[in-house]
Image: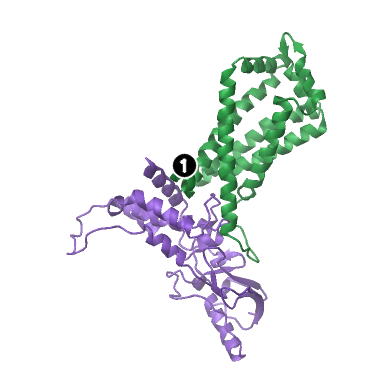
Chain colours: A purple, B green
């Protein structure tokens, strides 16, 4: 199939940037979206032009690097799918595709489609850990965790930190990300000790890093490639209120 | 204080003050509906309300405080959120959010302007004085609230302003009612869609209940 791409091109963080139009021909429906961009880049390089810079790593949907808003939807809008797992069979011959980077004050654009997502790491460092003694290997069942709690924690821990929640949020809030990290530790015995400080520190770090406030639009839940539910935000709110008493 | 500076603290304050304001509009609506119980009912209701004296002023002070908190943080959060997302996408498709949710600050400002107008009209009687003068006439020894309302709403402009404001209230509550449930932490996942549906339904009830009053006088049913 033949496609018209409108790709965000920006030389560096200070550059203004603009959408540029490219024609790609002979795209296979079995190609992934990133493979289609690889082909485009080969053509650009052959033509002596600068290839489109985009982030990618595992290409199997678990690393959270491929941060692109495709036709107005983070990761292209296919349910529980990252860009690398989005295939060209989702598009039709002659389609026009708009490809833009995540846009948020907290995610400065580095080049073309690459943004700096370090702000998420800063939020994580502010409380996404438990302090415990390491040393000898602990006995397997020394700390008993009820299965529903383990499942709940695991559902929250599915978050891969890609930033699609921020990219899709009208307020550029990272509340879904932050709540997944808070909730995952809040239900486990190892996380209980620091629960009060964690929720305060992580939500404070979120604001300090320039993310917006959550106003319950729930766009994040729809955009999340891992299906993180906004019930974790309700959980974060409960943890916050508990921390105040 | 952490509650007034943090993101979740302010969200909780928005939810709690919003919830209390919803409590007020329930009571206010029930009082208003007495207009359908004959010309005397609302006059009796109004007289009783005014006879409470200091209680009315305490109530007004609490209302003012609730409004102040809700409006201050609402504006502050909206401003912070627009700075957090300075650059718009060339194409952005909203997937689940609603007009209600996206227009909270605008419907909120409309409601604020409306409340000021409403107070100038029915509480202080400084606008539409030709209609509000009816309050100075006593019917069976009571101020004639009924006639004041009737004469006011028979003016198309007044009725349409009130009805328009109730649509703003409808959209504001369409997001606000379910939003406070989420903010206060009552969402276990499966309950979410039901809570949103109930919230919208209750918003419709408020719209019909409030807008009906100017409507019946405007079209001359009453």
In this rendering, the answer to whether B48 lies above or below B22 is above
In front here: A24 or A88?
A: A24
Q: Residues within 10 Å of mark 1 (few under 14, many from 20)?
A: many
Left or right: A181 in relation to B41: left
Q: Point out the residue furthest to the front here.
A: B1
Name the image quarter holding residue A47: bottom right
> Residue at the spot x=50%, y=72% of the render?
A66
The residue wearing badge 1 is: B184
Spot occupied by residue B61 in the image (x, y as percentages of width and height): 57, 28
Chain designation of label 1: B
Q: Nearer the viewer, residue A103 or A39?
A: A103
The answer to whether residue B125 is above or below residue A34 is above
Q: Position of residue B68 (x, y in %)?
A: 58, 37
Looking at the image, residue B44 sits to the left or right of residue A113; the answer is: right
Q: How many marks?
A: 1
Position of B57 compared to B121: left or right? left
**Residue B160 is at least partly visible in this image:** yes
Above/below status of B109 relative to B216: below
Quadrant location of the N terminus of chain B in the rendered image = top left
Q: Residue at x 34, y 50 (%)?
A: A195
Q: Please state the horizontal and vertical placement of residue B55, each as a whole percent of the image.
A: 56, 20
Is residue A160 something one can see in this rendering? no
The residue sitting at the top extreme is B140
Give the percent coordinates (x, y) of residue B9. 47, 45
Residue lying at 69% horizontally and 25% vertically, measured from the top left = B123
- Element type at marker 1? loop
Work out which quarter of the rendered image holds the C terminus of chain B and state it.
top right
- Classify B182 as above or below A63: above
């Amino acid at each position: 199939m033949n496609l018209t791409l409108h790709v965000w091109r920006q030389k560096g963080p200070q550059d203004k940037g603009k959408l540029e139009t490219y024609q790609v021909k002979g795209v296979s429906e079995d190609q992934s979206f990133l493979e289609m961009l690889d082909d485009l880049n080969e053509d650009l390089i052959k033509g002596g032009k600068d290839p489109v810079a985009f982030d990618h790593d595992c290409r199997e949907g678990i690393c959270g690097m491929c941060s692109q808003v495709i036709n107005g939807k983070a990761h292209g809008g296919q349910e529980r799918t990252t860009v690398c797992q989005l295939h060209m069979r989702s598009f039709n011959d002659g389609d026009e595709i708009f490809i833009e980077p995540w846009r948020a004050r907290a995610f400065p654009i580095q080049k073309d489609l690459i943004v700096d997502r370090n702000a998420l790491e800063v939020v994580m460092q502010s409380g996404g850990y438990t302090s415990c003694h390491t040393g000898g290997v602990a006995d397997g069942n020394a700390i008993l965790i009820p299965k529903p709690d383990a499942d709940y924690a695991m559902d929250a821990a599915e978050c891969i930190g890609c930033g699609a929640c921020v990219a899709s949020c009208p307020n550029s809030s990272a509340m879904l990300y932050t709540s997944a990290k808070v909730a995952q530790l809040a239900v486990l015995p190892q996380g209980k000790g620091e629960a009060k400080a964690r929720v305060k520190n992580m939500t404070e770090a979120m604001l300090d890093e320039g993310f917006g406030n959550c106003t319950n639009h729930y766009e994040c839940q729809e955009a999340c490639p891992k299906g993180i539910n906004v019930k974790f935000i309700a959980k974060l709110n409960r943890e916050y209120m508990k921390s105040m008493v | 204080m952490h509650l007034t500076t943090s993101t979740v603290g302010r969200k909780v304050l928005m939810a709690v003050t919003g919830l209390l304001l919803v409590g007020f509009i329930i009571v206010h609506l029930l009082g208003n509906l007495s207009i359908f119980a004959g010309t005397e009912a609302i006059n009796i209701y109004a007289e009783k309300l005014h006879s409470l004296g200091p209680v009315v002023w305490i109530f007004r002070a609490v209302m003012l405080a609730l409004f102040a908190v809700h409006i201050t943080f609402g504006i502050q959060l909206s401003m912070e959120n627009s700075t957090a997302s300075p650059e718009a996408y060339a194409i952005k498709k909203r997937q689940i959010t609603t007009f209600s949710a996206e227009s909270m600050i605008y419907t909120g400002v409309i409601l604020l302007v409306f409340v000021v107008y409403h107070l100038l009209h029915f509480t202080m009687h400084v606008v539409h004085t030709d209609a509000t003068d009816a309050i100075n006439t006593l019917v069976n020894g009571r101020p004639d609230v009924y006639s004041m309302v009737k004469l006011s709403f028979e003016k198309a402009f007044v009725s349409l302003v009130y009805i328009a404001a109730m649509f703003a209230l409808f959209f504001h509550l369409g997001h606000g009612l379910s939003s406070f449930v989420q903010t206060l932490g009552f969402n276990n996942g499966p309950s979410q869609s039901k809570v949103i549906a109930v919230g919208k339904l209750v918003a419709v009830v408020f719209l019909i209940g409030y807008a009906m009053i100017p409507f019946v006088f405007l079209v001359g049913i009453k």
